[in-house]
Image (tube, rainbow, N blue to C red):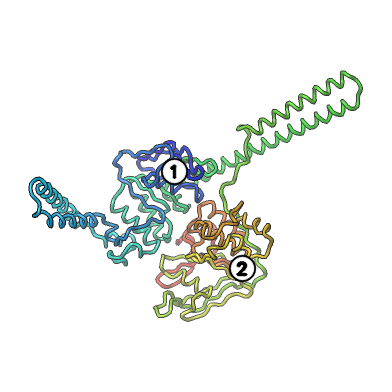
Amino acid sequence: MLHVNLLSKGYFEPLFENVTFHIHRGERMGLIGPNGCGKTTLMRILMGEEAADSGTFSFSPPDLSIGYLSQGFQYRDLRVEEFLHSDLIHIQKLEEEMGVIAGTLFSLAGGRRTAMEERYEEILRELNVLSARSKEYRADEILKDFDLAVIDPKTRVEELSGGQKTRLGLAKILTDKPQLLLLDEPTNHLDIHMLEWLEDWLNDYDCAALIVSHDRMFLQRTVSGILDMDPETRTVRAFDGSYSDYLSRKSVEQKRALSSFQDQEAEIRRLKQDIARIKQQAQTTERSTQNDVQRRYAKKVARKATAREKKLQRYMESEDHLEKPKAGWQMKLSFSKPEHIGKRALVVENLAVGYAGQPSILEGINMDLKAGDRVVLSGPNGCGKSTLLKTIIGELEPVCGRVLHGGGMRMGYMAQEQQNPDPEQTVLEVIRQRKAASDTELRSFLHFFLFSGEDPLRKVHQLSYGERVRLMLASLVAEGCTFLLLDEPINHLDIPSRECFEQALDQFEGTVLAVVHDRMFISRYANRILRIEEGLIREITAYEL
């Protein structure tokens, strides 16, 4: 259905080169790789929104129907019903053209009048077809299927939230019933309920798909193969099987590559030691004897050792020499060990939260978090999770009840909507405000967050979303927080970064209360899960997610 052959693309330097893969009927392939390696660019090329530098791609059959969900896609000034049902826009345009023709028809004569009359009849026939088809269309039914029933079809798309836009885009794809899906991060902004709904829909829908996602559980449950985009080699490798099968094969390959590299390095060390020993023996013999035969023999041995040394050097400079395998693009985080804190981190008693002048969003909340608890706050979008975090951190006043922080707690908050530092500040200046150290030490600190080279001198407004998230994490670390409140901290992080984020939090000895929809993260990290449902909060197990 999709055939990609030797596709290359670059801007100031190559992004990817000679990418080749095929997706056949019924296959669902997950396209993975770190942020910035070219996944979205590849999708845009396949949709004709960008041109490749070289290579080709084709669809089979050529008129294959394609459903494309772009990342952060922008809408024109459309209403929801117009976006879902493009025939409505076409009908409107035809009616406008028909009105223009009717207004000018009587002033025309001869051939021009005949041509206009024929066009008028053609529009009438087309309108009849579209009108009949539009009678079968029900925007409210489609919106209900995607938990968007509360939205008025007359609402402008630009007024919707990120999650609503994602679901609306999926709803549009469903109405068009494509044979090939190209989905660029469809899981962004979806809560667990909608993630599971999308998984079931994909598994029941008979089509091929190319899916970009950082949600590991979603990939595990939906794809039949993995396309791994490697920024080091700038290529794409195909792996059959599930996401866990891919991880297993990559682990074996990395272990083999590391073993081969270690064997090579051991052999190089042995050869260097032998060459150095032979040279030393030859020099010692030449200096310690006046015997011409022995001196000539010592020089001959020294020349052979020098030849072996040059041969070894040529090998080390050749393509046969193995470079040390890289662990991959990863975010290296190291949270400071918290100072001594009390046994209790947070107590919430009979709390109601909401906004002034409006009904409470949540009521009767009681929570008791111990120091060191790893708590995930779960629930559907819009249920009040962010409002609860803002009330705990003190950004919002409780409607009633009280919030008690444990003694010695130093709270750090990462909001879902980024509160960025001064856009004109550099990365180094941002961290310097939070951590007393020399510039050299701060640069070393920032290196663990993948700000290397000249990156610390870049200004905040020049950073991508993912880079800003890393800067916010670095700021929390620098401030020495003992209680982290994180509102969807990994939503825009790629898979390696999510895994390293989990490892870092494993080493963090403080308390964490996080809003997260990544089920793999929840199952690996959380020791408690609190779910908000219908205005109430209760503790659940991972099996109830």
Which label's residue is closer to the chain start, 2 or 1? 1
Asked if residue 417 is positioned above or below residue 210 in the image, the reply reads below
SS under mark 1 = strand
Q: Label 1 amino acid?
A: Gly
Q: Secondary structure at mark 2?
A: loop
Q: Which residue is mark 1?
A: 225
Q: Is residue 38 above or below residue 198?
A: above
Instruction: Quote the CA–CA distance across marks 2 and 1.
Output: 41 Å
In this figure, which residue is indicated by the disc labeled 2? 482
Pick the residue in front: 348 or 329.
329
Question: Residue 528: in sight, yes or no?
Answer: no
Please report the residue visible at 77 percent of the width from the left and 24 percent of the height from the top.
303
Quadrant into which the C terminus falls: bottom left
Name the foreground residue: 240 vs 414.
414
Q: Residue at x 8, y 55 (%)?
A: 106
The kind of residue on which mark 2 rests is Thr
